[in-house]
Image (tube, grey):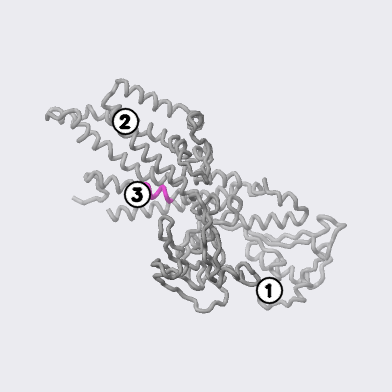
Amino acid sequence: MLKYLFKRLLHGLFSIIMVVVIVMILIYSLMNRQLIFASDPLYAKRLNNAKYTYRYSKWEEYGYLDYVTYADYLIDLTVKGELDEETRKSAVSFGRTADKDTDIVKEYVAEFTEYYESRGYTVERLDAVMINPKKVADGGQQQLYAYKDIPLINRLVKYFTRLITVDNVNNVKDDIEDRGLTFTLFDPLYGGKTFSPAIIGNGTTHKYLLYFDNQFPFIHQNLVTINLGTSYSVNMGVDVFKTMTSPQGSFVLSEITFPTGFTEMSADNLHTATYISGSMTGNKVNEDRFDTDYTNVDLFRSGFSKMGYSFVIGIISVVMSYLLGVPLGILMARKKGKLLDKLGTVYIIFIIAVPSLAYIFLFKAIGGSFGLPTTFNMDSASKLMYVLPIVSLALPSIANLMKWLRRYMIDQQNSDYVKFARSGGLTEGEIFTKHILKNAIIPIVHGIPASVLSALTGAIITERVYVVPGAGNLLTEAINKYDNGVIVGVTLFYAVLSVLSIILGDIFMAMVDPRISFTSKSR
């Protein structure tokens, strides 16, 4: 069994990598990169060379290419001590055209060109006269830059090596005294008197690496961070995993005592504090509240995260599907050709024939006529807003379970083992329970992990119709906004869930039926 699971994990890992490779090829090689500016108002407002600069800097930000300007190159030489400040200023003063550059400009432009072209970069220069010959302001209109598309293998290595990071006491590069970790049984944020173990870092990115609070799952860690990729438009500057797991809704205020002893009503979650260099310098607000540069905190909010809403709605719909679909499917098989079977068949045909969007809107209208909420409100205390999304999500699963069980159990009624059981004097009820259902339940059990884990992904159509702030429409929103980081990150997340569901399904099958073995024995 262990050997089988190990092979499954290796195959799953290979599948996940291939999925990411295919998605990256589609995004970075086959999709027109100019499309990211389709709804960018800042790009439309820029003119002349400023538009070129903005375009390439954005392409670099979105991960298409590596982009270096001549000015950055000179600054880098100055930092390294290979160039003084006065020479740098002289070297950046272009003429109107390349033939009118000074000797020192020509020298460093040639060095820049040779250095980057030898490394596979394309070097381009835009002179002021090419854009507007009547306007040259101290070389401000000229641009010299080098760019190179990032090879797929480099992009993959960079992505997967940064996928999981472990916080350590050397993460902060500033001069910090007493770098290290402190383990305490009494968290100072609770006054140092309440038993609440915590691990506090100094020199780490996060101040609290491990802590307890009253929020599920009650024990939290910041030691290991999952980085699925940075969002550039859906949730600008925030990692995809954090976007999916951060709480939403309005702020929840409570009395907070800050490290300096200052107390006020605030939504700050001090356990999430991360280091910001120089945040205390000249910042009166921070100096009143914090005693170190660990000042960047998340906020307590009233709602679940995107993944939380999808999981709550999804898991309840899965439970509802199995509680209704399994017994109804069994009853349809046992009452074949009777009224219950005919009604169930009508329902199955309805779900299969009618597009999901149509019957979701239909049930939304019916539910609204009975006074049920038809849109989601994160700040609402009413649980009735969950009813319609859960029912709409459960309908197709119920029909699928009913169809499968009915078909399988009817097919098995004329099998040899069923005939043998009848000849042995067993009743029809005993045959269904001890024989037919026992065999039919195996593939159903195999599908449970997939159903539960897929609940995390949400349902795109259902969540969009009922305006559920879940993970279901995150991918479509990212595609519409050409947010490459979110597209790759969410795809990777879904791929991992798919592999886990397959492996867990196999394990559950082996647990339910001892006849199933994933080990091969030589005879």
Compared to residue 73, the image places residue 241 above or below, namely above
Of pointers 3 and 2, the one earlier in the residue sequence: 2
Q: Is residue 253 visible?
A: yes
| Depth order, front residue of 350/420 | 350
Q: Picture quarter containing residue 394? A: top left
Q: Which mark is residue 137?
A: none
Up the image or down, 78 lies above or below 412; here it is below
At label 2, the amino acid type is Gly
- Alpha carbons under labels 3 and 2: distance apart: 26 Å
Look at the image and give the residue range highlighted in magenta.
Answer: 496-503
Answer few, some or many: residues within 10 Å of disc 2's Cα (few below 14, many 20 plus, some between 14 and 19): many
| Residue at image location 45% in from the left, 35% down from the top | 392
Q: Residue at x 59, y 47 (%)?
A: 30
Spatial separation of the CA atoms under disc 3 and disc 1: 53 Å
Return the residue at label 3: 503
Residue carrying label 1:
77
Q: Residue at x 63, y 65 (%)?
A: 119
Circle 1 crowding by C-alpha within 10 Å: few under 14, some 14–19, many from 20: some
Q: Secondary structure at mark 2?
A: helix
For the residue marked with disc 1, what is the amino acid? Leu
* Crowd tier of the residue under label 3, counting other residues whose Cα lies within 10 Å: few below 14, some 14–19, many 20 or above: some
Q: Which residue is mark 2?
A: 329
Of 33 and 212, the residue lying toward us: 212
Question: Mark 3 against mark 1, which lies toward the viewer?
Answer: 3
